[in-house]
Amino acid sequence: MVSQSGRSAEIVRLLDAAASRAPVIAVTNTPEAPLAARAQAVIFTHAGPEATVSCKTWVCTLPALEWLGAIFTGADQGQTRAILHQASPAVASYLENWRSHVAEFGTVLEGIRQVFVIGRGPSLAPALTGGLILKESTRSAAEGMSSAAFRHGPWETLGAHVFVLILEGDAKARRLNRAIGADIREAGGFSALVSPDADIAALRIPQVQDAIRPILEMLPIQMLTLAIAARLGREAGRFELATKVTDIE
């Protein structure tokens, strides 16, 4: 077994090797992290300590990367900043009713034994992370994947016990994601859209610019973890077997 100090030394060695070949730009929540110490430029997310699964740090990384992308592509930084500033009030607006969202999911999930979260384009990131935190937070069957990939093997698992949460996404993905939702229901599964005009109130997110949509799409998934954990009599996000991967690797 490699000791903690041995792992840290290996991380430092790899970062030094990377820095010798190209500049390292770090996005991190932890100023004392080896990544921050070895990077030529650092963006701190200031998300604060994580108590359970990585919800805050992941969400806060999204605007940091959007800002970084604007710098790399030469986009209008003032416009980018204005768009990113819309995220906080939009998140607050959704979370005002978080208790009722969790309660509604409790009804929606009646008879559900498996959950999929699917999306396309920029919404693929919250879909994949959503599947991960559902497993971590509730210790129940869940998976995140692209909408197109779901049409392969997972399609054969469809039934009344399967809930497919579809991230509607931007204008390019909307038609395809609405179509797969209809096809899932026709095949006997249960699907619902995360959308500004969603039928289920807990899935209804504020209308925002595409750049910050993935931030809002994560919120219903987080509410879903609370509802599933409550149904199973667990504390959402409390690790029983796992630990933070950053404590090990």
Image (cartoon, rainbow, N blue to C red):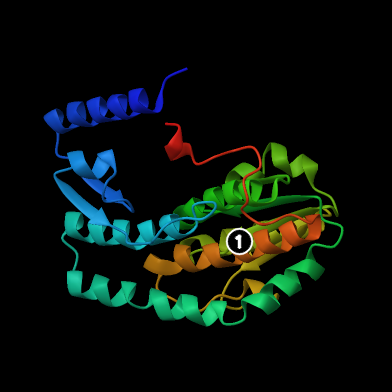
Apparent side of residue 39 relative to residue 46 in the rendered image (left or right): left
Apparent side of residue 249 relative to residue 35 in the rendered image (left or right): right
Res 50 visible: yes
Apparent side of residue 82 relative to residue 95 in the rendered image (left or right): left
Residue at the location (40% across, 68% down)?
212
Q: Quadrant of residue 157?
A: top right
Q: Position of residue 99 (x, y in %)?
A: 67, 76
- Which quadrant is the C terminus positioned in? top left
Q: Quadrant of residue 60?
A: bottom left
Q: Position of residue 162 (x, y in %)?
A: 79, 52
- The answer to whether 16 is drawn above or below residue 99 in the figure is above
Of 172 and 57, the residue lying toward us: 57
Q: Position of residue 73 (x, y in %)?
A: 19, 56
Counting other residues with Cα less than 10 Å from the Cα at mark 1, is it few (<14), some (14-19), or many (20 or more)? many
- The answer to whether 195 is drawn above or below residue 10 in the figure is below
- The answer to whether 89 is drawn above or below residue 116 in the figure is below
Residue at the location (68% across, 50% down)?
116
| Residue, disc 1 | 221
Q: Position of residue 223 (x, y in %)?
A: 63, 66
Q: Quadrant of residue 165?
A: bottom right
The amino acid beneath tag 1 is: Ile
Of 180 and 80, the residue lying toward us: 80
Q: Secondary structure at mark 1?
A: helix
Of 227 and 86, the residue lying toward us: 227
